[in-house]
Image (cartoon, rainbow, N blue to C red):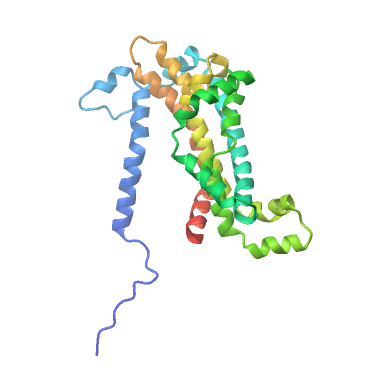
Amino acid sequence: MMPKRKSRVGKGPGITTYVLLLLVAVLSFFPYYWMFVVASNDTSVINEVPPRLVPGDRFMENVRTVFNNVPFGRALLNSAIVASLAALAQTFFSALAGYAFSKIQFKGRNVLFVIIIATMMVPLQLGVVPQFLLISRLGWVNDLRALIVPGTVSAFGVFWMRQAIDAAVPDELIQAARVDGAGTFRTFRSIVVPSIRPQASVLALFAFMFMWNDFFWPLIVLNKQDAFTVQVALRQVQEQAYVTDYAIQMAGTIVGTVPLFIVFLIFGKQIVGGIMEGALKG
């Protein structure tokens, strides 16, 4: 008799998988740990050979220096306001546009969608001059509206929402809602939004991270310390020293990164669920 082969169906990952995952996790976390080591010592630790791997006791002192040099607390608040409002607005308007491109028939729909996607290939720097002129005429220089309004919609957001709605909401469901007398916005609110909530959470996170980490555009339109965002405030800390103080710079960077970690901890499950759901439906 032929020996029976052992079935591997239902077996979990082996030890090699866990070792590889652990190695990837360590390599991913190490830059943040090294940043904390530098932030908790003086700046001379950056040149030590071999490098020091043990945190020091100067972290809180370096953090206080950051807050004393610039209004960093106000910068954190400004970044939170800008990133939160822009993320919510971008998710809402991108979902509306994605719904129109996915489920509403109108003349020139495909051509207009292609044009929107084509704008993703245009470097952002090319639009800085006309955008700054427009912001200046509106009187929004040194105003957070100069950051929030341009971030209320993006070509990537429209593309992402269009694909999500196309995969998650059947055309028959939209037609049934119209037969029952639901209008366009009522259908969007009652049927489309609940169906794409995981994918919308992913887009909101991407938008929040982009607005929080954005440096180039805030540097152009914000000149007053009360209007600084986190990234501009970190640059201001550096400008006040004759030499680069890496310890203070890293301390400010760690404080500026904490809100992103908090967002990931709170919404991590929804974010992973949205990505996996989109992958399975795709």
Q: Nearer the viewer, residue 282 or 268?
A: 282
- Give the farthest residue toward the left: 49
Name the residue at 49% across, 29% down. Answer: 127
Residue 160, image x, y percentages: 53, 48
- Give the farthest residue toward the right: 181
Q: Nearer the viewer, residue 223 or 127?
A: 127
Residue 153, image x, y percentages: 58, 38
- Give the farthest residue toward the bottom: 1
Residue 85 in view in this figure: yes
Name the residue at 59% across, 44% down. Answer: 94
Residue 1, image x, y percentages: 24, 90
Residue 265 in view in this figure: no
Residue 52, image x, y percentages: 27, 27
Q: Is residue 69 above or below residue 4?
A: above
Name the residue at 36% across, 39% down. Answer: 29
- Judged left or right of residue 195, residue 251 is left
Q: Is residue 237 above or below residue 275?
A: above
Q: Is residue 12 above or below residue 208?
A: below
Q: Nearer the viewer, residue 68 or 212?
A: 212
Label tally: 0
Which quadrant holds residue 60? top left
Q: Nearer the viewer, residue 75 or 46?
A: 75
